[in-house]
Image: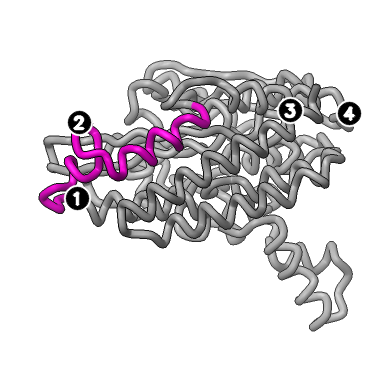
Amino acid sequence: MTSRKQLKAQVRARMAKTGERYTTALAHLTGASPAGGWTLRGGTDPDSAGVNTMLAARGITGLTEALLFGIGGGLGAGYILWEFKQHNSRHVTLGFCNSWQYITRRTEKALNRLGIEHEWHRSANKAAQTWLTGQLDAGNAVMVWPDRFQIGYWDLPEEFDGHGGHPVVAYATAGDQVYLDDRNLAPFTVAREDLDRANARVGTWKNQALVITDEDRAIDVEVAVREGLRDCVEHLSQKSDSFSLPAWRKWARMMTDTKAAKAWPKVFADGQGLDVALRGVREGVDGRYGVTGGNLRPLFADFLDEAGHSEQAPRWREIAEMWHALGALTEFADMGKQLSALYDAETDAIARLKAVVD
């Protein structure tokens, strides 16, 4: 995925080559989509990038992807190792954003903290499809949560059917095709029947959708930024070893434990599924390989810069590189040591941030 920094670098490179103004070069690189003038902006975090583009399309200014990410609570932590009998497979689920286990919560928090009017919608299949058609016909962009296997363009194996996925923005139609914004920088479409099937696949968030109803105003972010920072500190200071920083310590222990049911030396004693698990770790921790933004620590550092706490940002960028290094490891003991170091580093960084928030 292309980050804001990468996009800016591409824009400046084009400006140097062509002599174009920034806005002209940006338009050529991102391209206003042929559908309704929608501007594709790229991005890192699906939730924050999608909402940011939806707000911009409604004329709501003063925000960035990084600010929205931080205002929604910023960072999180989480680790779960799943075992599935059907395909005799093991999958690692990692959480790197606030309230990662609840698909809509941080977006709801960000919008509420900013006082932005919006509408959530869920209904049975036919009613949901009719509602989505009405919104798109009215020119309203809609955030939806399609199953990543069923949507098709990720080209995943069947064993990922029903595993869910991240939000994307449907913003226009062309015949039986729907234009999607999934942080892409060139327009693309999917068949409407594929989108409907993917939206309905996962029972826990079946046909979940969001539309922004506010428009044409600037946003004062100061209070919302403070609330987001406080939320981040409180969230990562909790004791949960599944949904907060202790998850990294638990995961470190599982890399060398030989007795626990979920210990890696025990789960992967036959080697079955180890390649999938290691690939899942690499994709999860490194945005260069995964599809949901990686460890998101660089985006949080951008938020700290934009929020006036630049002195805190370098440490989170260092931590991001530690996560990247973890993704390249394959020995359990080495991974355990790196995870222990990450737990210590993030615990210390949150303590420093707490001092600022307090």
Please tell me whether mark 1 or mark 3 is closer to you in this view: 3
Magenta stretch bounds: 244-273
- Mark nearer the viewer, 2 or 1: 2
Q: Is residue 157 magenta?
A: no
Q: Secondary structure at mark 2?
A: loop
Residue type, label 3:
Lys
Residue 283 located left or right of residue 223 = left
258 vs 68, nearest the viewer: 258
Mark 2 — residue?
Answer: 261
The verdict on residue 256 being magenta is yes
Q: CA distance from mark 1 to mark 3?
A: 40 Å
Residue at label 1? 273
N-term mark: 3 or 4: 4
Horizontal and vertical percent for residue 8?
A: 75, 63
Are the two marked residues, 2 and 1, in contact with CB atoms closer than 8 angstroms?
no
Viewer-side label of 4, 2: 2
Q: What's the amino acid at mark 1?
A: Gly
Label 1 neighbourhood size at 10 Å, few (<14), some (14-19), many (20+)?
A: some
Q: Mark 1 touching mark 4, by CB under 8 A?
A: no
Measure the C-alpha gap from mark 4 to mark 2. 50 Å
Identify the secondary structure beneath mark 4.
Answer: loop
Q: Is residue 355 visible?
A: yes
Q: Earlier in the sequence, mark 2 or mark 3?
A: 2
Residue at (47% x, 18% y) in the render = 122
**Spatial distance from mark 1 to mark 4, Cα to Cα?**
49 Å
Q: Nearer the viewer, mark 1 or mark 4?
A: 1
- The quarter of the image holding the N terminus is bottom right
Which residue: 59% across, 43% down?
345
**Lower sequence index among marks 4 and 2:** 4
Disc marking residue 220: 4
Q: Say what secondary structure mark 1 lies in.
A: loop
Q: Nearer the viewer, mark 3 or mark 4?
A: 3
